[in-house]
Image (cartoon, rainbow, N blue to C red):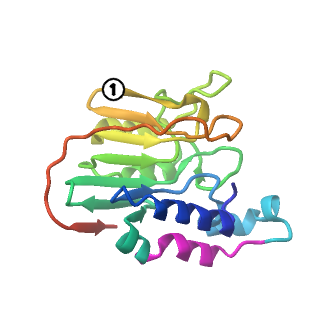
């Protein structure tokens, strides 16, 4: 799982098959190397020696407008999506604190990561990030808290109704703290086996019409 074109194509095919769900809101993560071209250009030989991937083409695949129009697949990269059918406001970001020199990493406590989180809208309903906030479903197998303190600070301010993340596979689960439901939705265990069940969360909705992008 390193962002190869075949993997992205299989993922899109899987999402298209989920016709029972009107919207599929997705983000990248640290394994999606090719979706961060600047990082990939410097580091591709670490994973893909002799078979360099075409980042531009792969990026077009996942950002193809027809995915949203025809299949309800919404890819967010530091972007907001407002779905007026449900009244829900989504925001998604792939970034996380530095982790073994993978994609979408920024230094902990840095101005760069603070700037990323500062873009989280104050009125967001559903926040989707790759990594967890500090001290919330972020404990790794060594018992260490690995979440981002700066992300937690913005969550406390924005008060989303739901925050969905992953990355720390062994911290899978959900909890409710204050106004926010937190879900570590890691499907894979530490051995990258997809054995952890999807988590379903019900949110009360207000029905309106249409959809709007806010970027």
Between 150 and 62, the one nearer to me in the picture: 62
Q: Give residue 214's position: percent from left, percent from top.
A: 29, 66
Asked if residue 129 lies left or right of residue 90, the reply is right
Q: Which image quadrant for residue 47?
A: bottom right
Image quadrant where one finds the N terminus: bottom right
Callout 1 secondary element: strand
Question: What residue is drawn where x is 53% and y is 60%?
Answer: 14
Q: Is residue 64 above or below residue 32?
A: below
- Crowd around label 1: few <14 · some 14–19 · many ≥20 (10 Å): few
Would residue 115 be seen by someone viewing this image from the given angle?
no
In-image side of 211 versus 170 (left or right): left
The answer to whether residue 103 is left or right of residue 109 is: right
Q: Please identify the quarter of the rendering in which residue 179 is found.
A: top left
Look at the image and give the residue range highlighted in magenta: 52-65
| Quadrant including the C terminus | bottom left
The stretch drawn in magenta includes residue 61: yes
Mark 1 highlights which residue? Answer: 177
Q: Is residue 183 magenta?
A: no
Residue, far top: 143
The x and y percentages for residue 172 are 53, 31
Q: Residue at x 54, y 39 (%)?
A: 186
Above or below 42: residue 139? above
The x and y percentages for residue 156 are: 32, 35
């Amino acid at each position: 799982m390193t962002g190869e074109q075949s993997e992205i194509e299989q993922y899109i095919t899987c999402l298209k098959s989920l016709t029972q769900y009107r919207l599929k809101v997705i983000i990248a993560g640290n394994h999606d190397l090719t979706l961060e071209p600047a990082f990939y250009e410097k580091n591709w030989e670490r994973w893909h020696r002799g078979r360099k991937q075409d980042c531009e083409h792969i990026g077009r695949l996942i950002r193809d407008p027809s995915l949203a129009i025809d299949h309800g697949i919404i890819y967010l990269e530091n972007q907001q999506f407002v779905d007026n059918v449900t009244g829900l406001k989504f925001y998604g970001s792939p970034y996380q604190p530095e982790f073994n020199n993978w994609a979408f990493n920024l230094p902990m406590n840095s101005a760069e990561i603070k700037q990323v989180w500062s873009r989280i809208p104050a009125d967001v309903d559903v926040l989707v990030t790759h990594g967890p906030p500090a001290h919330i479903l972020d404990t790794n197998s060594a018992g260490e808290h690995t979440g981002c303190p700066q992300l937690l600070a913005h969550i406390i301010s924005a008060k989303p109704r739901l925050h969905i993340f992953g990355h720390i596979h062994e911290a899978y689960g959900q909890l409710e703290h204050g106004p926010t439901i937190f879900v570590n939705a890691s499907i894979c265990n530490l051995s990258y086996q997809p054995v952890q069940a999807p988590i379903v969360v019900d949110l009360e909705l207000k029905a309106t019409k249409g959809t709007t992008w806010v970027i």
